Amino acid sequence: MALMYHNGALLEGDLPKSIVVDSLLSLDSQTAVKSPSVSHWWKIVRTYLKKAGKKETQVVLSNQDSDEACSAGKLLKKSTITELAQRVNSKPSRFTLALTAQDAAVEGFCTSNCGFHGSDSGRKSVFVWVGNSVTQCPGQCAWPFHQPIYGPKTKALSTPNGDVGVDGMITHRSRQLRLVE
């Protein structure tokens, strides 16, 4: 898999929250960008949604919440992630992105998934969770930015932002977003 660099601006420095927020906002980018781009990919996803008769979405960042005290602990069940997402997302028809740090262990993470999504039918809201795999399972959840533990031992791609864990999270966040729509 080869990607072509189009001489665009690159994010750099120790800004993982910015990387995630910027990547989310880039889904609805209205500025002209060269292909391939995230907004181009998202337009393709939207084309499929439209053909399926689904409602179009718009990405708006409404608030952010950091639980640096790890109020639910660092060993989490999927149900705990669901509860946390629902607690943060109290408004109807909203989307919550839940992220866990590299030292948080979530049920099924690395062994059966790199992220998951769910919904609250009462609020008509959805959430996506992804974890930072850099110390636990980068060969499973940070590919293509880390050499895979299974299959051909191909060279890993350079990370766009210099952070294997966060760039892997963005990859899996995008996959889960596509599944939620």
Image (cartoon, rainbow, N blue to C red):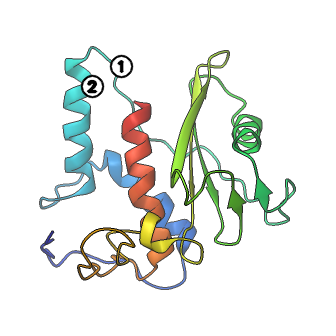
Location of residue 142 in the rendering, given as x and y in whole percent from the top left corner: 43, 68
Q: Reply above or below: 105 against 119.
A: below
Residue drawn at the location 71% of the way across and 65% of the way down = 104
At label 2, the amino acid type is Leu
Q: Quadrant of residue 149?
A: bottom left
- Going by the image, does 21 lie left or right of 48? right
Q: Quadrant of the N terminus?
A: bottom left
Q: Do the residues labelled 2 and 1 touch (CB within 8 Å)?
A: yes
For disc 1, the neighbor class at 10 Å (few under 14, some 14 to 19, many from 20) is few
User: Which residue lies under the disc numbered 1?
Assistant: 55
- The disc, 2 or 1, on the residue closer to the chain's N-terminal end is 2
At label 1, the amino acid type is Lys
User: Which residue lies under the disc numbered 2?
Assistant: 49
Q: Nearer the viewer, residue 100 or 144?
A: 144
Instruction: Choose mark 2 or mark 1, whichever is in front.
Output: 2
Tally of marks: 2
